[in-house]
Each structure stands twice: as C-alpha cells, then as structure tokens.
Amino acid sequence: MQTLVQKAMEVLGKLEEGHDSLWSALAVWQKQQSKESLEIAPRRNTRNSKVNTKPPPKKKERGKTDTETFFWINCSRTFELVLAKSPGGPWWPAFVCHPKDQKMVRALASTNRILLCYVGREELHVVKANDTKKYSPGVKDTIDSSQYDGNFIAKYKRSMALARRVYRAKIAEPH
C-alpha cells in the first residue's frame, strides 16, 4: 500500500508541475501578445507629436516555453480533428481538447492558442491557432524519409491511418 501511495504522489506531483507550467507559459504568451499589439500600434512622441512607427527594441524573453513542455489540464478530448504543425516535424493529425476550467478557456483564447492531443500520442500540447488547419482525409501521408528515421515515419503513418478511420466513423454516425 505504501508503494502505491508513493507512486501516486509522484504522479500527482508531476501533474501539478505540468499544470503550473501551463499557467506559467500562458503568462509568458499573454505578455508576448501584449508586446506584439503594442508594436503594431504606432506610438506618439510627446515632444513633437510625430508618429513613431519604429517598434520598440525586443528584449530576450526568459523562461521561453514551447509545445514540447509537458502540460496537464483537466479537459475533455473531442473527436474534432485538425492538422497541427508539430515542432520540428510535419503537419500531424490531432484531436482538439476543451479545458473544463473557464479561466483556462479564456486564457487560451486571449493568447490565440488551442489545446491538442496529437493522434497516436497521449500528452497534451498547446499550439498557436494559426498552426492548425482543418483535417481532410485526402491529406497524403507522404513524408520526406530523408529527414526522419523509420520509427518516426511508422508512427506518422499509423497516426494518419487512425485519423482517417476516426474521420470516417464520425461521418458515418447518424446525426
């Protein structure tokens, strides 16, 4: 029993770290979003009232977080399929996930990001909405074999085949 409790505590600790890292990432992304919107808007110089179109100098962002960071959030996975640009990889089929926490929903929306679970993988990922497109079963699962090893290519093809089956089953279900 003690071993079970110890293992459960380890898992809960990792889940809590993942949840905290997601909130930290959202804070960084919201800050970046604010900076980007300020850069787009012209700034006025108060001395001579000329419009300053030069963007402010960019500062190096500490604690940069990307989609490879482990995240956890209480959510429901849908059968809504999209293709998402995987970091350093090809467009990969993914299920859209909906957080159950409304504060998280608003935070993701404010940073123009969505929560995904790539087909064939278990972990959650957060990606920019611009890095997704609607899934279509006609997408060819051709991949440049010179860039990836055989194991990666096999996983990719299995994921594409599973996405096609899920898509066909979704289309066939009565409305």
Image: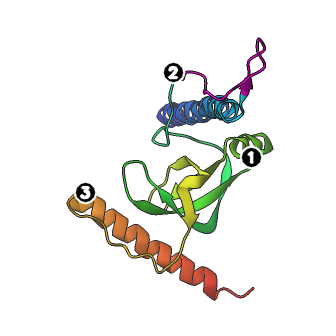
Q: Is residue 25 magenta?
A: no
Residue at figure coordinates x 25%, y 60% from the top left: 151
Q: Is residue 46 magenta?
A: yes
Q: Is residue 29 above or below residue 113?
A: above
Q: Secondary structure at mark 3?
A: loop
Q: Which residue is mark 1?
A: 105
- Identify the disc placed on residue 62: 2
Q: Is residue 77 above or below residue 14?
A: below
Residue at figure coordinates x 29%, y 66% from the top left: 154
- Residue range in magenta is 43-60
CA gap between label 3 and label 2 equals 31 Å
The answer to whether residue 38 is left or right of residue 124 is: right
> How many labels sit on residues?
3
| Front-most of residues 25 and 72 | 25
- Give the image location of residue 139, x and y in percent: 44, 75
- Give the image location of residue 145, x and y in percent: 23, 64
Q: Secondary structure at mark 2?
A: loop
Label 1 near label 2: C-beta < 8 Å?
A: no
Q: What crowding class fits label 2: few (fewer than 14 Cα within 10 Å), some (14-19), or many (20 or more)?
A: few
| Front-most of residues 10 and 46 | 46
- Give the image location of residue 122, x and y in percent: 49, 54
- Counting residues from the N terminus, which is met first, the one under dot 2 or under dot 1? 2
Label 2 near label 3: C-beta < 8 Å?
A: no
Task: Provide the major secondary structure of the magenta segment.
Answer: loop
Q: Which residue is mark 3?
A: 148
Residue at figure coordinates x 51%, y 24% from the top left: 63
CA gap between label 2 and label 1 equals 25 Å
Q: Amino acid at mark 3?
A: Tyr
- Kindly indicate the quadrant of the structure image that contains residue 111: top right
